Amino acid sequence: MLLPKIIVILGPTASGKTDLGLALAKKFNGEIVSADSRQVYKKMDIGTAKPVGEWNEEEKVYIVDGIPHHLMDVVDPKKEFSLADYKVLATKSIENILSRKKLPIVVGGTGLYIQALVDNLDIPKVEPDKHLREQLEKKKLPELVEMLEKIDPDTAQILDLKNPRRVLRALEVVMQTGKSFSKQQTKSKPVYEVLQIGIDLSPEELFKRISSRIDGQIAEGLIEETKKLAGKYGWSIPSMSGIGYKQIGLYLRGEMTLNEALEVLKRDTRRYTKRQKTWFKRDKKIVWIKNTDLALAQKLIKDFLRK
């Protein structure tokens, strides 16, 4: 049986995925399905580098330059949003796009989101345990990481250990089930035929883009956005621990000067992109293109769709 075809455009933060995905969606009558764990949140725009667009209430989709972007701007910042939630909603969006004879183009840098779709992961359906969550939230991130490394070393090797939400969730699952979090994410038969295109930039070029992006975010009002979000939600909700809001929070609470906070933000973003690249390099099915080579990406997609 022929499987429906989808495209994935992936790469580290600031590599140019958004613009490339948009150009390809226009060329191939496509729609975007975001695979970004931070751009799902409403009101978190500048700090997540969300492309400028507007919410279409009638179709329940975020429109950027005429192209629908699914799974963007859909969750309140104070709400929990799990990998299982993502897979359900992304699958629904892909089916919807396919039913209208359009091409689904998954765009993002959250490796686990992409893997959930590409490898059709079975994700453990473990409900949050309020009492356990409260106990874990009292601990600092290094303590949580140490716990995870002790009770589930396999997961600790592949998880983003700088992300408190991911570490806490992995601990919650393994402590409730007694089984490794990563080993519960088993692969089922694929439901799509997938072409994965990765954007490969030199570290020098990527770091230059990161620095330029962050300077631009400050000019666009990242400090004001962070202050507004903290005023409404406080600092303790998981979404406020994301890169950008966390470091600007250090400045707003008087724990660092602005220059210090920006240096930490640039450093943490560089480190995050290294972890993203390490994650993606494990998948040998990804076809890498230098920079955002639109002509090559178009050729790869044309050849893929012709098969």
Image: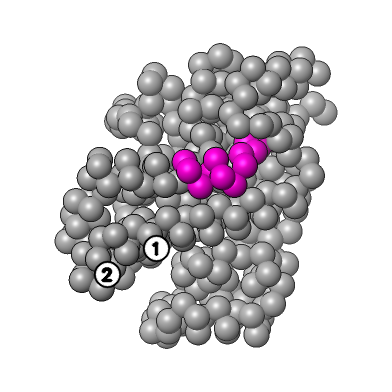
Which residue is label 2 attached to? Answer: 256
Q: Disc 1 residue type?
A: Val
**99 w.r.t. 154: above or below:** above
Which residue is label 1 attached to? Answer: 264
Indicate the secondary structure of the residue bearing disc 1: helix
Q: Return the x and y of residue 167 as percentages of the image width and height.
A: 53, 71
In magenta segment, residue 197 = yes
**307 w.r.t. 9: above or below:** above
Q: Return the x and y of residue 144 as percentages of the image width and height.
A: 51, 80
- Of labels 2 and 1, earlier in sequence is 2
For the C terminus, give its image quadrant.
Answer: top right
Indicate the secondary structure of the residue bearing disc 2: loop
Q: Return the x and y of residue 77 as percentages of the image width and height.
A: 32, 55
Residue drawn at (23%, 53%) of the image: 223
Report the side of 61 relative to 25 (left or right).
left
Q: Is residue 268 visible?
A: yes
Task: Please state the extent of the stretch shown in magenta in the rendering.
Answer: 196-209
Report the side of 227 relative to 98 (left or right).
left
Q: Is residue 131 visible?
A: no
The quadrant in which residue 84 appears is bottom right
In magenta segment, residue 268 = no
**100 w.r.t. 136: above or below:** above
Q: Return the x and y of residue 106 as percentages of the image width and height.
A: 57, 35
Residue drawn at (56%, 21%) of the image: 24
Residue drawn at (32%, 41%) of the image: 216
Q: Disc 2 residue type?
A: Met
2 and 1 marks in contact (CB < 8 Å) = yes
